Amino acid sequence: QVQLVESGGDSVQAGGSLRLSCAASGYTVRNYCMAWFRQAPGKERAWVAIIDSDGTTYRAISVKGRFTISADNAKNTLYLQMNSLKPEDTAMYYCAAADRKTCGLRPSNYNYWGQGTQVTVSS
């Protein structure tokens, strides 16, 4: 059974940093595609960053230059380093994992989800 458990969400001021973690069990990170999504109240869930099985990363334009996705095989954990946070980054952040090596941008492209971790950025 696959389990993804996120942690690291918090309330911070604009300009601050956070690192989100997603500990995986029953699933090996970097074997397939993994991603971070976020969902703000009243908005659709949207992709933030993706890492494929080759280690290639992709970031949404809104977070490029500020967020970095990475994976630690030894710890079987996915990370999202978030710097220069803005109020518009406020959302619930979700870790997602796929059963395929081809990465997609839609939530429907991912088979497994964590419970989410809340990030709140105040101005």
Image: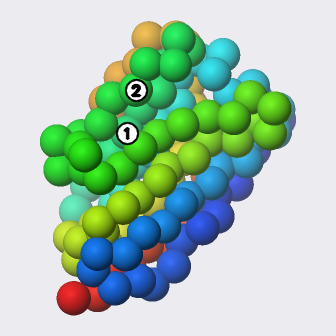
Which residue lies under the disc numbered 1?
49
- What coloring was used for the rendering? rainbow
Image marks 2 and 1: residues in contact by CB distance under 8 Å? yes
The image's mark for residue 38 is: none
- Residue 103: image x %, image y %? 41, 19
Q: Along the polypeptide, which appears first: circle 2 or circle 1?
A: 1
81 w.r.t. 108: above or below: below
Q: Residue at x 56, y 58 (%)?
A: 20
- Residue 6: image x %, image y %? 64, 58
Give the side of residue 69 with respect to residue 66, left or right: right
13 w.r.t. 106: above or below: below
Q: Residues within 10 Å of mark 1 (few under 14, many from 20)?
A: many
Amino acid type at image mark 2: Thr
Which residue lies under the disc numbered 2?
57
- Residue 120: image x %, image y %? 38, 79
Amino acid type at image mark 1: Ala
Residue 13, quarter of the rendered image: bottom left
Can I make out residue 40 in this image? no
120 w.r.t. 6: above or below: below
- Residue 41: image x %, image y %? 28, 73
Dot 1: what SS?
strand
Dot 2: what SS?
strand
Give the side of residue 38 with respect to residue 96, left or right: left
Measure the alpha-carbon separation of dots 2 and 1: 7 Å
- Label tally: 2
